[in-house]
Image (cartoon, grey):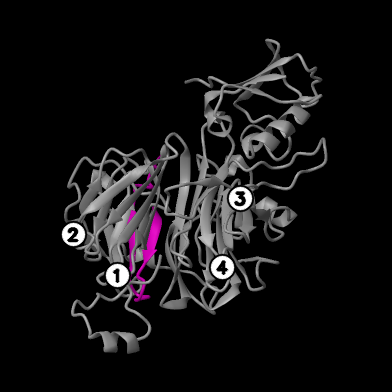
Amino acid sequence: MKVLIPSPLLSYTKERKVEATGATITELLADLDRQYPGLRFRVIDEQDRMRPHMRFFVNGEQVFGMTHLLSPHDEVLIVQALSGG
Amino acid sequence: MVRATKKSVTRKPEPAARARRAPRRRPLRRALVLVATRKGAWLYHGDATRRTWRVDGPHFLGHIVNHLVLDPRDGRTLLAAAKTGHLGPTIFRSTDLGRTWKEAARPPAFAKVPDGGKGRVVDHTFWLTPCHANEPNAWYAGTSPQGLFRSDDGGVTWEPFSVINDDPQYRAWMGSVQDGTPDGPKLHSIIVDPRDPAHLYMAMSGGGVHESVNGGRTFAPIVQGMEVVEGFDAGNIAFHDPHCVRLCPSNPDRLYQQNHCGIYRLDRPSKQWVRIGKSMPRRVGDIGFPIVVHPRDADTVWVFPMDGTTVWPRTSPDGKPSVYVTRNGGKRWQRLDSGLPTSQAWWTVKRQAMTADAQDPVGLYFGTTSGELWMSRDEGKRWTCIARHLPEIYAVEAAEV
């Protein structure tokens, strides 16, 4: 599936749109980390929670759980929250 | 820090004599000052006389860099503790003095707790200490919230170190986010006894000063004599707030401490800290963040007092910044402000942002909360600003390369 990468993570992917696979957000992040080592820990903490200012959207809808189910034609958007600035 | 070097001899020996001589002369070494800030890191390369400086940076522009440290054992490996306002914490590593960087494969992170549990999360790595000289590539890291970590591969992978991260008693002493400093409670001042890699000290803000004599398997508090904020119980380790602890390289049985409540000295094997800040001028007080020890004289210490009255402005007292030095282990203090602003300078210096090199005379360096980098080539007699307009400076380290 297509994954849109926010600018703070371009140092890992070098491109805005990448391809990754996974049946859940957890699996998707594992695949992204396999392709771009280190990326996952910058957005997911050691307790497997999304970091406070990172947001995930699937087909335009925000999702909150790491177990959210994905299908190959979904489009996932990783966003750095505006967080007041 | 690395050792000072003697000046090179300029006369060239005859070829036969040169062949007999061993080892070869060490080249004249250059000063290197490592500056970590709220918005990135900078390296200042000085000449051997420490009079001219070449800036290299920014590195990691926009990253919050809490500490940038050169490995004194190889003289080329740099570790940087970094995060951004949004992205999680990591460690960057360079083996070519910052020309290229590679991220740690496994940065410091607390143990994962079972689903439904409330495990801790590293907000940032705050402090980096190379392990003993006989443990090449090994490093310690202190984090916020308080955690102790170790790497044995030059900073590539990190593991929780010692039992304190999950020990119920230590967790109680660490307190909660509400008990820590405004930007998070911290484990800092990780000190390795140069005589014994198994003898360690570390400090927590808050949570006291602690010692291990068994390589970190266990720690025990060492807080006798340390005062706490009025009205609190000094018998409760959680109420102790050491800001910075340093061990004297010339006498590893002596430690100095800048605390939330004064300046202290500890002479082992005693476990009793002595408040030597009582002899500071009353109008200045003995509150501050950093404390710097002389590389060769255990009686000489520098501090940078700040205003810790009323609401804790954390500025220089009266807007008149100054370093203070004692040359006799804290009996008397002398003001060292020549070259510094004489009024209306409302900055201060954070706990990692003041350091000394090992040259003779000793060079001193500090970075301000207003983004200025100051240095003295004569142990504080005269100060010069060598960089302005940097972001808020969090840490300054001096080395020679």
**SS type, badge 4:** loop
Q: Residue at x 55, y 49 (%)?
A: B186
Tell me the mark number nearer the camera, choosing from 4 and 3. Answer: 4
Does the CB distance between marks 2 and 3 fall below 8 Å?
A: no
Q: Quadrant of residue B6?
A: bottom left
Q: Position of residue B154 (x, y in %)?
A: 57, 58
Q: Which mark is residue B382?
A: 2
Could you classify mark 1 by the number of other residues whose Cα lies within 10 Å: few (under 14), some (14-19), or many (20 or more)? many
Identified by mark 2, the residue type is Arg
Q: Which mark is residue B146?
A: 3
User: On the rendered image, what quadrant is the N terminus of chain B found in?
Assistant: bottom left
**SS type, badge 3:** loop
Q: Of residues B4 and B347, which is closer to you in this image?
A: B4
Q: Which mark is residue B359?
A: 1
Q: Position of residue B287 (x, y in %)?
A: 38, 54
Q: Position of residue A16 (x, y in %)?
A: 57, 22
Could you classify mark 2 by the number of other residues whose Cα lies within 10 Å: few (under 14), some (14-19), or many (20 or more)? some
Q: Of residues B343 and B68, which is closer to you in this image?
A: B68
* A44 vs A71: above or below: below
